[in-house]
Image (tube, rainbow, N blue to C red):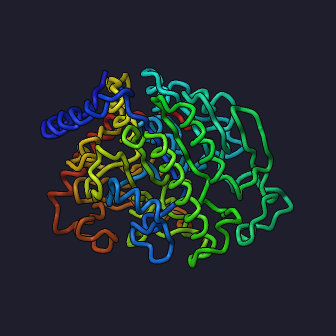
């Protein structure tokens, strides 16, 4: 049996957090509800509260003002499928086999999916009586054996894979289909509890309809506890927006889409306030990977970070990370602590009082101390592309063993010695300081050796 590694100071901070949680649990609902909202391909620089000059996100900005905004928050992978598998299991993608060096994500003809033996946040929270639902893009295997219901979700409404898949033969070729997208260029199904209810899915209304379902579910289960996983289809290309938001943003269609997402986060938070659930519900907002930069102005922005989706440069995996739990998370907290979507499982389980002891290695930490404004137990981050360990962060330092742009560079470039950047001094990864910091490199290489010794990859489910 493996326990999560935890240091003495973090035990103390965890104890403080546990005391805080006990007061959280002292009301008539003993366990906090958990809502995870995941945007698709939203970049580090795409929200007002992360510095975007023209995309207006007043509801997410308010969420940050009332809660916590991480400046160093990481998705668990650089593309959709491995990132989602890791978020739901708290395990790096190679451990579940939900990654591949060839087909990097699941496609409509993929026959694999998230293995039955993996334990998701939903399955584990169900052991404490949580009602669970997933509304949005699944992308962890579309065959019934891998469905959300097989992984602990009582309800599901959404699309099984990316909205640019299942393209019909008569649609325009290549990126041309994205420039003026029409619903019938793609044959993506919309499913409700395993049944196709619409095909092609009307993508103009997905953002609103996922949110409608989430609000309905929250109201139906307001006695709690509940877990809602809300992985939006947007702003992944093809971009679709409802008529209410079309043509409104100075950032054109991409801005319209993000502003509609923002408004729907606002609707969900308001529903929680109206139901008097705000102080009993942890809401996390983040993105599955960085912006898809090769999509021109239809892709987002990683702000000052290098590269984007598909890459293990910072822009591929450092994403917006907001957490909201009024009365427990101090308002207006800006945290420079390290945290990752890998940490959502251990953190949610700790808040729910689920024993974290598992018969398998976990790669996440209970970051509830950081959520209450303290230190994070996370000191390192491993950046994988498929099964390849590309880079490692330790404290402020990041060493690249290999580099490859997200798209357009066919082979990775290996680095021996590794490239080394101090991300706190140089967040854009411009100045390689390996030569002057041999001791740091040695420390990171020792960490790599230890990590590799504990990594037993599963066969790929995506090939
Ligand atoms: Mg994505």
As drawn, 30 above or below 45: above
Image quarter where the C terminus lies is top right
**Would residue 430 be found to the left or right of residue 163 on screen?**
left
Residue 416 pos. (x, y %): 31, 60
The furthest residue to the right: 170
Tell me which corner region of the image, top left, top right, bottom left or bottom right, holds residue 237: bottom right
* Nearer to me, 253 or 362: 253
As drawn, 163 above or below 230: below
* Nearer to me, 361 or 12: 12
Give the residue displayed 22% in from the left and 46% down from the top.
446
* Nearer to me, 310 or 333: 333
Give the residue displayed 43% in from the left and 51% down from the top.
75
Tell me which corner region of the image, top left, top right, bottom left or bottom right, holds residue 277: top left
Q: Is residue 413 visible?
A: no
Q: Quadrant of ligand 1?
A: bottom right
Residue 126 pos. (x, y %): 48, 24
As drawn, 13 above or below 184: above
Give the residue displayed 26% in from the left and 51% down from the top.
330
Residue 96 pos. (x, y %): 49, 34
Number of numbered callouts drawn: 0
Q: Is residue 310 visible?
A: yes
**Would residue 439 be found to the left or right of residue 460 on screen?**
left
Image quarter where the N terminus lies is top left
Tell me which corner region of the image, top left, top right, bottom left or bottom right, holds residue 183: bottom right
Give the residue displayed 82% in from the left and 58% down from the top.
184
**Would residue 140 be found to the left or right of residue 309 on screen?**
right
Residue 134 pos. (x, y %): 58, 38
């Amino acid at each position: 049996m493996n326990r999560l590694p935890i240091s003495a100071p973090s035990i103390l901070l965890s104890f403080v957090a546990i005391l805080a949680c006990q007061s959280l649990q002292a009301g008539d609902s003993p366990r906090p509800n958990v809502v995870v909202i995941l945007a698709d391909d939203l970049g580090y620089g795409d929200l007002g509260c992360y510095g975007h000059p023209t995309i207006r996100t007043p509801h997410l900005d308010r969420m940050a003002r009332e809660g916590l905004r991480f400046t160093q928050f990481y998705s668990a992978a650089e593309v959709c499928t491995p990132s989602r598998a890791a978020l739901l299991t708290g395990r790096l993608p190679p451990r579940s086999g939900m990654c591949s060096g060839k087909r990097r994500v699941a496609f409509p003809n993929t026959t694999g999916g998230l293995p039955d033996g993996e334990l998701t946040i939903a399955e584990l929270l169900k052991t404490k009586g949580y009602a669970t639902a997933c509304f949005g893009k699944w992308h962890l295997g579309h065959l019934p054996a891998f469905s959300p219901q097989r992984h602990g979700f009582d309800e599901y409404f959404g699309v099984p894979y990316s909205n640019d898949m299942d393209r019909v033969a008569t649609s325009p070729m290549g990126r041309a289909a994205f420039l003026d997208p029409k619903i019938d260029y793609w044959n993506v199904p919309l499913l409700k509890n395993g049944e196709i209810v619409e095909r092609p899915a009307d993508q103009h209304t997905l953002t609103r309809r996922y949110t409608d379902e989430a609000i309905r579910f929250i109201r139906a289960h307001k006695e709690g506890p509940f877990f809602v996983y809300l992985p939006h289809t947007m702003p992944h290309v093809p971009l679709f927006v409802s008529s209410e938001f079309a043509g409104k943003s100075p950032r054109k269609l991409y801005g319209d889409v993000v502003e509609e997402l923002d408004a729907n986060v606002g609707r969900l938070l308001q529903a929680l306030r109206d139901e008097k659930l705000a102080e009993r519900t942890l809401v996390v907002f983040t993105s599955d990977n960085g912006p898809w930069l090769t999509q021109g102005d239809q892709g987002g922005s990683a702000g000052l970070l290098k590269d984007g989706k598909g890459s293990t440069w910072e822009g591929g995996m450092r994403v917006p990370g907001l957490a909201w739990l009024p009365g427990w998370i101090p308002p207006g907290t800006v945290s420079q602590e390290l945290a990752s979507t890998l940490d959502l499982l251990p953190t949610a389980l700790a808040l729910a009082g689920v024993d974290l002891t598992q018969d398998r290695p976990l790669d996440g930490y209970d970051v509830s101390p950081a959520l209450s404004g303290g230190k994070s137990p996370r000191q390192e981050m491993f950046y994988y592309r498929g099964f390849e360990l590309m880079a490692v962060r330790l404290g402020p330092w990041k060493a690249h063993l290999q580099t490859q742009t997200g798209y357009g560079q066919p082979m990775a470039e290996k680095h021996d010695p590794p490239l080394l950047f101090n991300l706190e001094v140089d967040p854009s990864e411009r100045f390689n300081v390996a030569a002057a910091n041999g001791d740091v490199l040695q420390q990171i290489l020792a960490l790599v050796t230890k990590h590799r010794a504990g990594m037993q990859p599963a066969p790929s489910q995506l090939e």
